[in-house]
Image (spheres, rainbow, N blue to C red):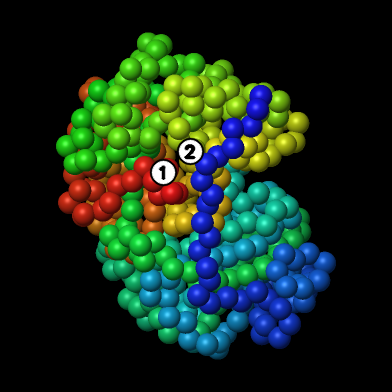
Amino acid sequence: MPIIAPRSVPRWAPAKWTQNFQRSHGWTVTGGNVGSSNLNDTTEFVRGTQSISLVTAGRATATGGTADQANFQKFGGQALNMNGKAIRLMFKVSDVTKLRWITFYVGTAGLANFFRWRVHTHTNTQNWVQSGEWVFITLQWGDVQGAGGNLSLSPARVPSTKSGFTDLRFQVVDAGTGPCTVRLQSVELIDDTSATYPKGLVSITFDDSWSDVFDNARPAMDAYGFRGTTYTIADQIGTPGRYNLAQLKAAQNLSGWEIAGHAYQGAIHGARYDGVTAEKVDADAGNLRAWMVNNGFNSDSFAYPGGRFGKTTDGVSVEEIVARYFSTGRSIISADNRESTPPPMPHRLRSLTGISSIAPGTANPANLTGPGGLLDRAQLSGGWLILCFHSVITTAPTNDAQIHKDDFESIMRAINSRGMPVLTVGEVMQ
């Protein structure tokens, strides 16, 4: 299968302030769960001549208290103005199965006053942070999880201030199942999404090629001039309940949608790319891209089956195989942070999935559109909010892959009333 090289090259957001942890960086290691540390680690680094590292003691309890913490921190540094800025972190974790979470703080007075972001929360299914590799994560104001002291968040999740922060902390809490090595290479400030999109940014995406999206979602979006990205399973096109080829072409050519890739074979989609060999992943992704090109669909966007981008059954990176054919890969990970523009890891785009009339939490339409919901956060505090829908129906939903047409329309109205731009994934990347 010949490689069909992606057409677009991801952009890089330059740092406006950076700490790369070269000598005399002034950071320290604290916490009751530190086994060992090295503040001038010359064994593994990707910038300059060193990074900083610690090894957790591996004895964390379920309390989350001070005894569980292993921290990199610096107090009393230069006051940082984070208006219109996001935090970009680069770090490496030796074994993510040993982690419970990573949290980042900014504040003052020894963090008596603080804002807090969750950087990573470990799951037993799919983790954005993979073991043994350097990763980037951006933290935007729309993702702040909590505040303390004299700092606060409004009901719409707008922070009381975005400047004057002198204290920084990168906090690791392990799972209590043994030591874990964490290396921190950089903490940076970059322009956040609001620099380009002052009212936030939304992409409306659909997985699995359900024909009710064409029947029910497309007209609701047409009413506002919204265009979507539909991630297509090629061999399902024209089968009962799915798009046919004429509908796909109408969505692209008459409504301006992006026709993107999800899988070539439905059977491979069901098995997930991390459930088959590298040879099968390469064949499926390559055949998918060729099918798209042959049918006039030139999107460079891809969504991993089941959102899973780990390793194949024979240990090859799914992400690296997909990158031979597509310039982006969308996951269904959304627990911790929204995306930024440009995204630092475009083959791990986050999205909010499971949006359903019967869903709990943030994926419920009322919570999504209500005060302090993800639309508010993206509009008022920055962030690229990628929404992932599956089936849009006119009967009562029975699972979290289904949303009633009325609830879908309520989300479209809420986006429109906020004046938020809606772009396809491919347009954002270009």
Query: Few, some or many C-alpha atoms within 10 Å of disc 2 (few <14, some 14-19, many ≥20)?
Result: many
N-terminal-most mark, 2 or 1: 2
**x 77%, y 76%: residue:** 40
- Depth check: give the residue in front, 315 or 225: 225
Horizontal and vertical percent position of residue 391: 34, 27
Please state the horizontal and vertical placement of residue 96, each as a whole percent of the image.
Answer: 67, 51
- Mark number, residue 425: 1
Q: Is residue 402 visible?
A: no
Residue plotted at (78% across, 64% down): 44
Q: CA distance from mark 2 to mark 1?
A: 7 Å
Residue marked by disc 2:
301
In the rendered structure, which amino acid carries the disc numbered 1?
Val
- Amino acid type of the residue tagged 2 in the rendering: Ser
Which residue is at a point 68% across and 39% down the rendered structure image?
A: 317
- Please tell me in which quadrant of the rendered image residue 160 appears: bottom left
Q: Nearer the viewer, residue 188 or 168?
A: 188
Q: Is residue 325 visible?
A: yes
Residue 383 higher or lower than 366, as above or below: below
Locate residue 30 relative to residue 241 in the image: left or right. right
Quadrant assignment for the N terminus:
top right
